[in-house]
Image (spheres, helix red, strand yellow):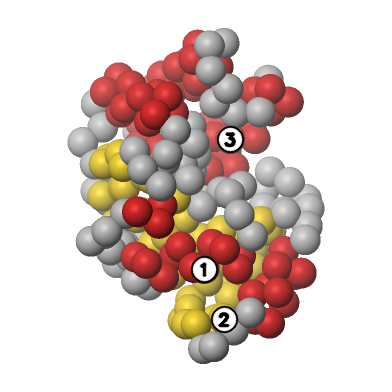
Amino acid sequence: MKKLNQYLSQFDVSRETLDKLKTYEALLYKWQKAINLVSNATIKDAEIRHFLDSAQLYDYLNNDVQSVVDIGSGAGFPALVLAILRPDIEFSVIESDQRKCTFMATVSRETSMNNLTIHNERIENVEGLNADVVSARALKDLNTLFGFATMFEPKFCLFPKGQNYAQEVAQAKENGWSFDFEEKQSITDENAKILKITNLVKTQ
């Protein structure tokens, strides 16, 4: 995981933490043989396409962030990577696929993670859960994500997006969403951006 380690070196991440990420990677390769955790087209380059792509959100988690809800978590990206990097933050993941939840629980156990809660249910069925940040990766368009995100009353949202993000922004505004956003270039894909959404309100 040379490229991931190089990126994380700027944050003074411990060797123990890096070892936990290696354990996660090994479990991903092992389980992928039995169940489709991630696309087979990306598994060979998992360090970049999944681990580094998730780790680049680390910089957004300042000291004011105490809780994160990740929706449609799948194999745990970005939530489990960030939970390993930030054990001081409480992470909740929501995933309807029982097998993927079992995988995330295994990663949590094997990496001695004490800051992760797994919700094996549909996003719209989750109640009584609030968070400082809502994240989602490769799940739905912004209009749909916003409907889910407001359930958790976040201070801001983090949504990695592809090259069509501007169309999604326009569509969300046409559908009555008011929000501010900052875009940042992804370090793993020249056509991708990370969107930080603030002041999210449905106006109509």
The residue under the point 50% across, 20% down is 28
CA distance separating discs 3 and 1: 23 Å
Q: Which residue is mark 1?
A: 146
Labels 2 and 1 touching (C-beta < 8 A): yes
User: How far across and how far down the image is residue 65, in percent?
Assistant: 31, 62
Residue 45 visible to an observer of this rendering = no
Q: Secondary structure at mark 3?
A: helix
> Which quadrant of the view contains residue 33?
top right
Residue 185 in percent (x, y) is at: 69, 58
- Would residue 100 be seen by someone viewing this image from the given angle? yes
Rendered residue at 73%/46% (across/down): 189
Type of amino acid at the residue the image marks with label 1: Phe
Q: SS at mark 2?
A: strand
Q: Amino acid at mark 2?
A: Trp
Observer-nearest residue: 78 or 39? Answer: 39
Badge nearest the viewer, 3 or 1: 1
Residue lying furthest bottom in this view?
Answer: 203
In which quadrant will I find the N terminus?
top right
Left-right relation of 25 to 138 = left
Q: Which quadrant is home to the C terminus?
A: bottom right
| Dot label at residue 50 | 3
Residue drawn at (56%, 58%) of the image: 159
When the figure is inspected, residue 161 is found, relative to residue 44, above or below; the finding is below
Furthest toward the front, the residue is 125
On screen, 128 above or below 81?
A: below
Label 3: how many Cα within 10 Å (few below 14, some 14–19, many 20+): many
Q: Earlier in the sequence, mark 2 or mark 1?
A: 1
Task: Residue 137 in the image: state x and y as whole percent.
Answer: 56, 48
Which residue is identified by label 2? 177
Snapshot quadrant of residue 161: bottom right
